[in-house]
Image (cartoon, rainbow, N blue to C red):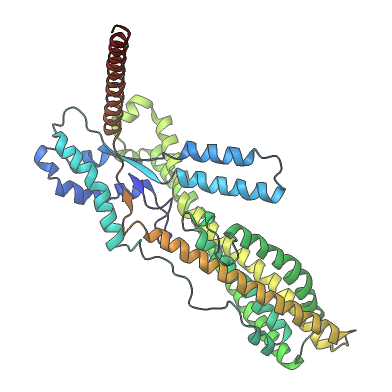
Amino acid sequence: MNLGSAGTYPNGLTFSPNDLRSPAILQRVYARAELDDYGLSYRDFAAAISVTPTSETYEGVIERYRSRLGQTNLTFAERQQIEEEFANSLRASLATGAVVQFNLPARHNIPPAVGRMVVTSIPDVWADIFINQLGVLDLPVPGARTNLISSDLLTELDYPAAFDALKTAFETLYARIDLARSISGSHSLSSPLTDRTLYDIERDLHNLERFSLTHVLEPLTALGINRSPELTQASYQFQLEELGRQIRLANENAAILDRALSTSDTLLVRGADRRLSDVSSGEGMASIPATIVQQFGPELVDRLVSMSVENAGVDFRESLIQAKLEYEQRALVLGVERERIAHRLALISEGRELVNESRLEEIFVTEADRLVEALNSDWDDVQAILAQANLERLAHDKQLFQPLPTPDAVGRTAEFISRTTLLAWIAAGFAGLLLGMFAFMIRALLSNP
């Protein structure tokens, strides 16, 4: 079958071929086909169903991009863009199709018609459950806001707060690009406003962030320019207190997890010693079949018990370690942010005079206005591409898949075409022979009056 989306559902959720083998789907198909009447258990039925990804466009994608990448006059940026599009198209081509197979051992006497009904029912039930119960066709819609950020808002804010607002706008736009990119096929769409793709928009956004936000506005903010020092100091002081609270909370959570890890290590060691002592004394042998001891000996049994103890709780311990590392990393990131704000607060508190402060403020305002215009333009382009992607996803008329002909049907079609072609050639040859004979007879009559 041909899926309606490449690797994701229309609402952006990741698709997996195993979704078609989920218990909710197989149980409904098993009941609908009344397979228990044929002596087929649900366990055997579930084991006989396989779903594998397939693609009919894989070779076409490779051939198309091979010719594009073979051009010798490409710039580095153009080649990088084509390579990224090629990787996305390749992943998409391998996620647009799936083959559902129902393979049973010979001992099960299932009529072929029932088998075909099972295979066709699985995608139907899957589409019904995922559309009506899980809402995979509830598409992300473009935001209602016309602009991402308002220049009037920045005018009312002090310079440090305006810088933070612009930084937040960048993060929001990056998140919107990721949302649009999660919709299959969106990487090949371009905005009707500026004819830019998502790659073009993200590239321009990276340049703005690097050369305008980071290299111009952030240094100006770090110098301590401000309109109202008292208000800015109060804002920074509040941020420092909030960051300190979050850092303490992250460190406390990491310490709690560290104590839990130490306790689990102690319990595992004690449990191992106790189990090994029980095995050595013979008290723990009651749960081990005597045939194992007789066949392999007590040394192997001791080793098996030791391995089970060592591996006990490994997954839980790994989850604790991962959570602890995340809290510690969060504390470090928040600490860096706190140092940055503390440095700004110290500069403002000193109350020192800046050389050409009015000129620096003018540069900040000009650059901020230019950023606002560029960010809003990028936002409009992403919204337009997102709207196009949503419309294309709805173009399949509320369907998640389209059935493709089976290999047997394709073979029969090819065979029919071959027979038809052969008959056409025979008929054309016979017609040519008749025309030749007719022309010969006419020539003979004309030559003999």
Q: Is residue 385 left or right of residue 107?
A: right
Residue 429 drawn above or below residue 212: above
Which residue appears farthest toward the front when viewing the image?
449
Q: Position of residue 168 (x, y in %)?
A: 62, 74
Q: Is residue 418 above or below residue 129?
A: above
- Is the residue 235 above or below the residue 370 in the image? below
- Residue for point 33% across, 64% down: 135
Nearer the observer, 441 or 315: 441
Q: Is residue 138 visible?
A: yes
**Residue 390, quarter of the rendered image:** bottom left
What is the quadrant of residue 41 in the picture?
A: top left
On-image quarter of the C terminus:
top left
Task: Tell me the quarter of the picture where residue 154 sits.
Answer: bottom right
Q: Nearer the viewer, residue 182 or 30?
A: 182
Outermost left residue:
37
Position of 317 with respect to 67 (left or right) is: left
